[in-house]
Amino acid sequence: MLLADDQALLRSAFRVLVDSEPDMEVVGEAGDGAQAYERARETLPDVVLMDIRMPGTDGLAATRLISGDPDLAAVRVVMLTTFEVDEYVAAALRAGASGFLGKGAEPDELLNAIRVAAAGEALLSPAATKGLIATFLAQGGGADPAAPAGGHAERLAALTGREREVLVHVAAGLSNDGIAGRLQVSPLTVKTHVNRAMAKLGARDRAQLVVVAYESGLVRPRSE
């Protein structure tokens, strides 16, 4: 994995933690977003642990560069936030991040987040992320000004009825096993529907499916 944070002390702490695991290795470090993109191209990590706020090229810009580079299609970005609810998280997910993690997370949470992102099977803290996106959309902060009007809604037309149903459950933060239980089908069948939905919607992972579900209007945020 690649560590991108402007605080050298924090990077060192993360490196010690990650390198202590038999199935993990830090292949590079970066002090800003521009370096993170360069190191990602050099090392092709499975996961980039990316701080959102960095001087110069920040984490959001770097994530857009990584997610927009065909050579880095397999790279997953996990955004590090100072607080559990961060004003940039929705934008980070739209930029191509696979999820987010608070800097105050416990070591086991961090390691699990890296493994989950590397596997590409689930959104990090799915229920929390879903609620966070819903909050931003309810506040009028969810619309992406760079996205074409009605773009997501038009792409939804390519989904089958069952794929739409699965997408709604993904947006609710359910795992494949959870969705399988709701729909009375096998987890493998759910995984197939999820993969097809991602292909049709041009989504890199489940995090992007959640964003599409809300921005297209398929799922509406509830007022608390």
Image (cartoon, rainbow, N blue to C red):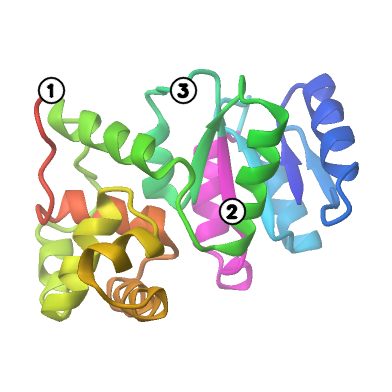
Q: Is residue 183 visible?
A: yes
The quarter holding residue 159 reads bottom left
Find the distance from the CA under tag 1 to the CA under tag 3: 18 Å
- Where disc 1 sits, the SS reads loop
Find the distance from the CA under tag 1 to the CA under tag 2: 29 Å
Q: Which residue, given by chain and number where applicable, does mark 2 sit on?
A: 116
- Where disc 3 sits, the SS reads loop
Q: At 14% across and 56% down in the image, what residue appears?
A: 216
Q: How many marks?
A: 3
- Where disc 2 sits, the SS reads helix
Of marks 1 and 3, the one in the foreground: 1
Q: Amino acid at mark 1?
A: Glu
Is the residue under label 2 in contact with that under label 1 (CB below 8 Å)?
no
Q: At 36% across and 77% down in the image, what residue appears?
A: 186
Is the residue under label 3 in contact with that under label 1 (CB below 8 Å)?
no
Residue 211: percent from left, percent from top = 28, 50
Q: Which residue, given by chain and number where applicable, does mark 3 sit on?
A: 84
For this view, does 105 lie left or right of residue 7?
left
Find the distance from the CA under tag 2 to the CA under tag 3: 18 Å
Disc sitting over residue 4 in the figure: none
